[in-house]
């Protein structure tokens, strides 16, 4: 076998070292980009309400004892009530705004009648919120201010006549608020027309 010159030996060693280094770096790079496997979590599947997925792990659902169901108006029903309220006011040539809120006080629908004042929008929503919060017409709640004047300081409330709760079995599920008529009594009369429309 022919001996390699010094220069050839140096070049051959450098090429071999470079190849070895590239292989090692590539392996390290490949390992660095591979995600680590998630640790397995074992959950007993024999608990009530547990369901097992394709992976075999169980997904526990809350038991019915930990749940509470509530009743809410549909958007269609809330709109129907608001429209009935608006029509009752228009039949008496009154320009009002009506708001319907759900059990949690969130606005579902608000209709501002033609010519209703700009202040009526917020007032209607706040009256509806107040009615559902205390499950009482706001005309009745106004009387409570005599003994508990700080009630009016609760954010989002308005203790003026014109709000009516919508009830199912005595529990509030929504509130209807009206503002814009010359008196709170008229506002509340129109709100009650909206409540009545839901019973039909």
Image (cartoon, rainbow, N blue to C red):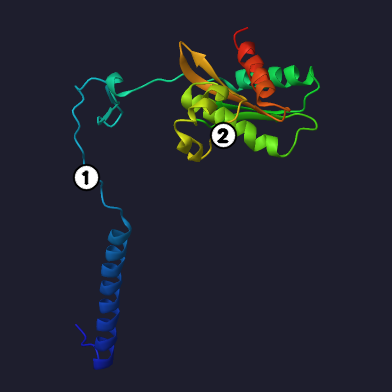
Report whether 19 appears left or right of 120.
left
Residue 102 in view, yes or no: no
Q: Is residue 74 above or below residue 28?
A: above
| Picture coordinates of residue 172, whole percent (x, y) | 48, 19
The disc, 1 or 2, on the residue closer to the chain's N-terminal end is: 1
Which secondary structure, mark 1? loop
Q: CA distance from mark 1 to mark 2?
A: 55 Å
Looking at the picture, tell me which residue is in the foreground, 186 or 39: 186
Whether label 1 touches label 2, CB < 8 Å? no
Q: Residue at x 48, y 27 (%)?
A: 144
| Picture coordinates of residue 128, whole percent (x, y) | 57, 28
Residue 109 in view, yes or no: yes
Q: Counting other residues with Cα less than 10 Å from the Cα at mark 2, is it few (<14), some (14-19), or many (20 or more)?
A: many
Q: Which residue is mark 2?
A: 158
| Picture coordinates of residue 86, whole percent (x, y) | 72, 22
Q: Residue at x 50, y 20 (%)?
A: 173
Q: Quadrant of the C terminus?
A: top right
Q: Residue at x 63, y 35 (%)?
A: 123
Q: Is residue 112 above or below residue 77?
A: below
- Which picture quadrant has residue 125? top right
Looking at the picture, tell me which residue is in the foreground, 87 or 145: 145
Q: Which of the labelled discs sits on residue 23, or is there none?
A: none
Looking at the picture, tell me which residue is in the foreground, 114 or 149: 149
Residue found at the very far front of the displayed protein: 146
| Picture coordinates of residue 174, whole percent (x, y) | 53, 22
Residue found at the very far top of the displayed protein: 200
Q: Which residue is mark 1?
A: 39
- Which picture quadrant has residue 44? top left
């Amino acid at each position: 076998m022919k001996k390699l010159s010094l220069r050839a030996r140096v070049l051959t060693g450098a090429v071999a070292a470079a190849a070895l280094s590239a292989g090692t770096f590539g392996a390290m790079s490949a390992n660095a980009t591979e995600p680590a496997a998630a640790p397995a979590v074992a959950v007993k599947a024999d608990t009530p309400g547990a369901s097992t997925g394709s992976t075999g792990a169980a997904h526990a659902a809350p038991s019915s004892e930990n749940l509470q169901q509530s009743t809410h108006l549909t958007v269609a029903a809330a709109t129907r009530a608001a429209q009935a309220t608006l029509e009752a006011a228009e039949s008496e040539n009154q320009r009002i705004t009506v708001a319907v809120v759900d059990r949690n006080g969130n606005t579902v629908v608000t209709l501002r009648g033609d010519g209703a004042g700009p202040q009526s929008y917020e007032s209607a929503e706040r009256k509806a919120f107040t009615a559902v919060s205390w499950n009482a017409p706001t005309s009745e709640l106004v009387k409570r201010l005599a003994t508990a004047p700080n009630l009016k300081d609760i954010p989002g409330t308005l203790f003026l006549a014109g709000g009516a709760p919508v009830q199912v079995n005595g529990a509030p599920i929504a509130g209807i608020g009206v503002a814009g008529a010359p008196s709170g009594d008229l506002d509340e009369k129109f709100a009650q027309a909206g409540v009545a429309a839901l019973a039909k």
